[in-house]
Amino acid sequence: MALEPLATRSDTLKKFLFEDRSVRIESVRIEQAWLAAQAHQQYPAPVTALLGQLVAASTLLAASLKFDGSLLLQLQGDGAIALMVVECRADLSVRATVKMRERPLPESLDAAHAADLQSLLNPGGTAKFIVVLDPPKHTPGRQAYQGIVPLEGDTIAQALEQYMLRSEQLHTRIWLAADALHCTGLLIQRLPLQGGAQQTEIETADESWTRAQHLAQTLTATEMLATPQDTLLHRLFWEETLHVFESKNITWKCSCTQERVADMLRMLGKAEVDDILQEQGKVEVACEFCGLPYVFDALDTEALFHASTVLGSKSVH
Ligand SMILES: [Zn+2]
């Protein structure tokens, strides 16, 4: 018997359907891409755990929506976390960031596994949960859809379940767990029956949904983090006959470039940039989304404003 190949990486989203097509299952485990996400931005453990859960959730939702653009999940907080945002595109490439306020984290935070959503984001009770569906660029009549609801629930999973029920009228259960090394998630969703379904089909679908929830609700965060994806799925659903769909790869990708940062510096103005240059010998700007640092030396900044002067004089003509 051949040895099982060593798992080199797990950045995979897997999709299944119950045999009677009444329940959808999605499982995600992100490791390499999650490490890449943290290469230039590090947060306290409870914040990392929350961000990881939101990253896992964004891939689960993006994969279940029939949508070609990008999905943004934003938590706007009034606590230690001011903003937590994840963007997941249709190809399941992800970027994410957190903006924190200068204040100590609340005490009595649990270990990384069950970071407290409400105490970090919503001590004042004004936090918002925002979902944006942004159609692909160059779409005719392109208009983003935006849903805003109060941030309710003790976990990101609960907040999302509520949101899915309100906005999509879909019964959805979500389990999320993350630490510095992994983001994991499981989603089960009850699919609407075709119109004119027989009573027996409705009963079978009801039973499937009850069974799926029953199987999945045994999951603990510790188990999700420690268990390889296939092992976990087998442990939960080994008695079910499942339709298996092609699995998808998750990647970490930010759209920042040297050129975009250059545009930002031009907007800041030559005087300001020269000041920084004089003070620090270089201008270092980090991408506000992924934290990647971009460095401009004296020569670079000179070119920056020289080019813009030329462009500016052209536009006068
Ligand atoms: Zn970036």
Image: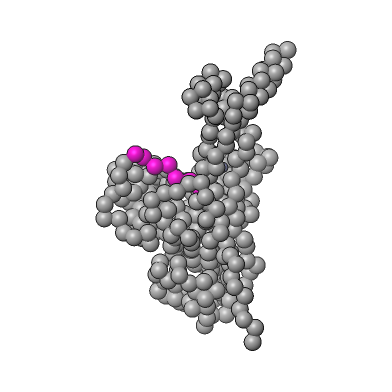
Instruction: Single out the residue that lies furthest toward the front.
Output: 281
Is 173 situated above or below 299? below
Q: Position of residue 148 (x, y in %)?
A: 44, 45
Name the one closer to the observer, 269 or 14: 269
Residue 227 appears in the picture as rendered: yes
Task: Magenta stretch: give its range.
Answer: 96-102
In front of the other: 88 or 68: 88
Nearer-the-camera pick, 152 or 293? 293
Q: Is residue 63 left or right of residue 214?
A: right
Q: Which residue is at 40% across, 68% downward?
A: 222
The quadrant of the rendering that contains the N terminus is bottom right
Which of 203/243 is in front? 243
Q: Is residue 97 magenta?
A: yes
Is the stretch drawn in magenta largely helix, strand or loop? strand
Q: Position of residue 169 (x, y in %)?
A: 48, 58
**Residue positioned most to the top:** 317
Quarter, ligand 1: top right
Residue beneath the point at 51% across and 42% down: 291
Going by the picture, which residue comes out furthest to the left?
108
Residue 128 on the magenta span = no
The reply, left or right, for residue 123 in relation to residue 175 is: left
